[in-house]
Image (cartoon, grey):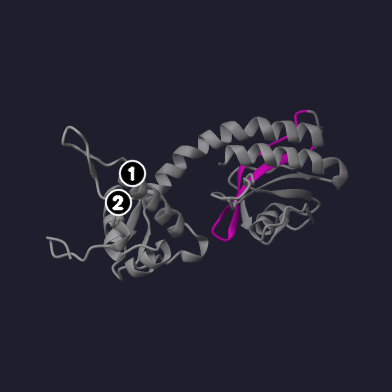
Amino acid sequence: MDDSGRTADPADAGSGSAASPGGRASRGPESSKTLDRGIQLLELLARPDLGGGLTITELAAELGVGRPVVYRLVTALEAHHLVARRANGRVRLGLGVSRLAAAIRPLVRSEARPILQELADAVGATAHLTVAEGDEALALVVVEPTWTDFHVAYRSGARHPLHLGAAGRAILAGRSGSSDLVVSGGEIQPGAHGLALPVLPPVSEGREPERVVEASVGVVALGPIDPATAKPRLERAARALAAVLR
């Protein structure tokens, strides 16, 4: 127990501030650890299966730290509206996260558009980057081919259940670790044929890939698309988009 009567957290042991020659505390390592824990907490609350939030005790168990550490993290994040505490004591993501997401989306669209344009023109089909939002697939960026007389009209912002269509089912496949091509026909729009691949994070040797955004890249046309021709182009687009979404 410290001087304030609060039980000391074992996770903080050995991470106190070191005095600098001038008498000022150097808080670099401790601040980095706090930032890392705060990011881990936000990523934990962002999990799709935790829509109702978590209690302080549950967060402490998931992060492997003491409750006092979590209280301090939640208080700091709450001050910036990145988390919110419900009346029942559960902590969930705050509206400040939505503002950050809204600010980043135009940047993602700007970087993804030329990648999708190259894909659309190469395959002769409408290309799209789709992301998961809850149990829905959201078409984040849609680009039409420049040279075809007819193509599928597909707008950015369109939503559909994840289990329908190539784009959503590719996200589900990526969630289970699969990188296989997904084919669909007429599931969302009669007469439309789609191909999609999950956008998976690059794999670093010795480290588990971290998937911040669940996404897929796909093409959709009014007639069947040759998988043998389209797959290499989709794979190239998926690798490029994975770098954009990191």
User: Which residue is depicted at the point 67% across and 62% down?
Assistant: 163
Label number found at residue 15: 2
Q: Residues within 10 Å of mark 1 (few under 14, many from 20)?
A: few
Residue 34 image position (x, y, % from top left): 33, 49
User: Which residue is depicted at the point 80% across and 40% down?
Assistant: 232
Three-letter amino acid code at disc 1?
Pro
Magenta stretch secondary structure, dominant: strand
> Magenta segment: does it hold 136?
yes
Residue 151 in sight in this render = no
Task: Say whether residue 26 is left or right of residue 154.
Answer: left
Question: What is the quadrant of residue 239 in the picture?
Answer: top right
Residue 73 image position (x, y, % from top left): 30, 54
Residue at image mark 1: 29
Q: What stretch is highlighted in magenta?
A: 124-146
Distance from label 1 to label 2 (Cα)? 7 Å
Q: Is there CB contact under 8 Å for labels 1 and 2?
A: yes
Foreground pick, 181 / 142: 181
